[in-house]
Image: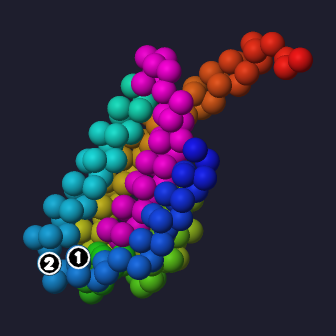
Amino acid sequence: MRIGAAAVLLAGGTAYFLLPLEGLGADRPWLGWPLFVLCLTCVAVLLLRHVRDVVLEKPQARSGIMISLLMCLAVLVFSSGYYALARQPGQFTGLSTRVDALYFTVITLATVGYGDITPRGQEARMVTVVQIVYTFVFLTAAATALTRRMHTVVAERERRPPPP
């Protein structure tokens, strides 16, 4: 299972750096915005499903791994959105590469905010606000469920009799 999770992370990271995100910006807002909203909605629904499984203590061995992967996917979705948005003049200061977008997403997620990348346009500011709210609601619930799942797994292992 760990190898599968690592493969999914590697595939997601590779896709982030290789997919033609340039076509999702100002040139095709009719495609970019719905795709962005759809991706975030799908991640949120899947996160809530796995969070529910943890809270209801359903014996899903995959919930912890899936929550971790979905949290990483949420970061990649926001990074992709920022990168596509940054191609529009006046939206961001200091954001021009995919690494910049990933960096800005993580810095915003961590609420650090160094000030080297700034959302200047209205769309960029709205997406940043959406990320902050999304983090408070979905990623915080996911992190809490992940912690709870880890405590459960550790407690189960401690209750097992030692091997002969």
Label count reads 2
| Magenta segment main secondary structure | helix
- Would you say residue 73 sits in the magenta stretch? yes
Residue 113 location in percent, x, y? 53, 63
Image disc number at residue 35: none
Q: Is disc 2 placed on a helix, strand or loop?
A: loop
Q: Is residue 161 visible?
A: yes
Residue 46 location in percent, x, y? 34, 40
Image disc number at residue 28: 2
Residue 34 location in percent, x, y? 16, 61
Q: Is disc 1 placed on a helix, strand or loop?
A: helix
In this rendering, the answer to whether 149 lies above or below 89 is: above
**Mark 2: which amino acid?**
Arg
Q: Quadrant of the C terminus?
A: top right
The residue that mark 1 highlights is 24
Q: Which residues are magenta?
A: 53-82
Q: Is residue 49 left or right of residue 111?
A: left
Q: Is residue 4 left or right of residue 33?
A: right
In terms of depth relative to the viewer, which is nearer, 126 or 53? 53
Q: Residue at x 81, y 13 (%)?
A: 161
Q: Residue at x 45, y 64 (%)?
A: 12
